Image (cartoon, helix red, strand yellow):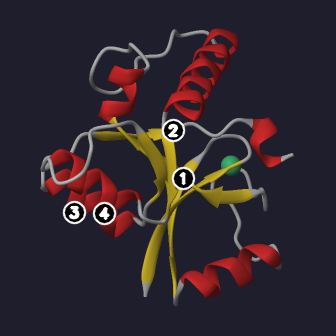
Amino acid sequence: MIKFSLVCRKGHEFEAWFKSGAAYEAQTARAQVVCPHCGSHDVDKAIMAPAVATRIASMPAGEPQPPPSVHDRALFLRQVRDEIHAKAEYVGGRFAEEARRIHFNESAPRGIYGEATADEVKELAEDGVPFFPVPRLPEDFN
Ligand SMILES: [Zn+2]
């Protein structure tokens, strides 16, 4: 069994268990994975980026604090996301491995982003590797 951090089209984050990565792909392809908050079938794996990416993006360390209004928040998240996409390297499913290597100076320090399972996220947090989830925005699903 494998647990993924998922996010729906409206930005609701939740976790779900799957037999395997392939089972996740098959179930989302058949719209069998549903957001528990709004019932949307438009769900995808949450993308994770280490805090080092925020430094490259000239952001303060730690989780960004979005402004309160919904419009500003969307704009802010879009800026963060665009900065990461522009300046960080996409490593896909190797995110947890690469984030750990960079954290322990086994790999060149650089901004990366990619996908991680909930278990990997938990292990990274336990190892003290700084990272945060990158918000997915509606156009990412287009
Ligand atoms: Zn939702």
Q: Are the residues flagged by discs 1 and 2 in contact, CB closer than 8 Å? A: yes
Q: Is mark 4 within 8 Å of ligand 1?
A: no
**Furthest-right residue in view?**
142
Specify the amino acid type for callout 1: Ala
Disc sitting over residue 97 in the figure: 4
34 with respect to 60 (left or right): right
Specify the amino acid type for callout 4: Glu
Disc sitting over residue 123 in the figure: 3
**What is the crowding at mark 4: few (fewer than 14 residues within 10 Å), some, or many (at least 20)?**
some
Of 77 and 58, the residue lying toward us? 58
Q: Quadrant of the N terminus?
A: bottom left
Label 2, label 3: how far apart the Cα atoms are? 18 Å
Disc sitting over residue 34 in the figure: none
Element on which disc 2 rests: strand
Across and down, in percent, residue 28 comes to 74, 73
76 with respect to 54 (left or right): right
Tag 2 residue:
134
Across and down, in percent, residue 77 comes to 58, 23
Label 1, label 3: how far apart the Cα atoms are? 16 Å
Label 4, label 3: how far apart the Cα atoms are? 11 Å
Specify the amino acid type for callout 2: Val
What residue is at 64 percent from the left and 23 percent from the top? 78
Q: Is mark 3 within 8 Å of ligand 1?
A: no
- Mark 4 or mark 2, which has the lower sequence index? 4
Tag 1 residue:
46
Across and down, in percent, residue 61 comes to 27, 21
- Mark 1 or mark 3, which has the lower sequence index? 1
What residue is at 58 percent from the left and 15 percent from the top? 76
Label 1, label 2: how far apart the Cα atoms are? 7 Å
Specify the amino acid type for callout 3: Glu
- The mark closer to the camera, 4 or 1, is 4
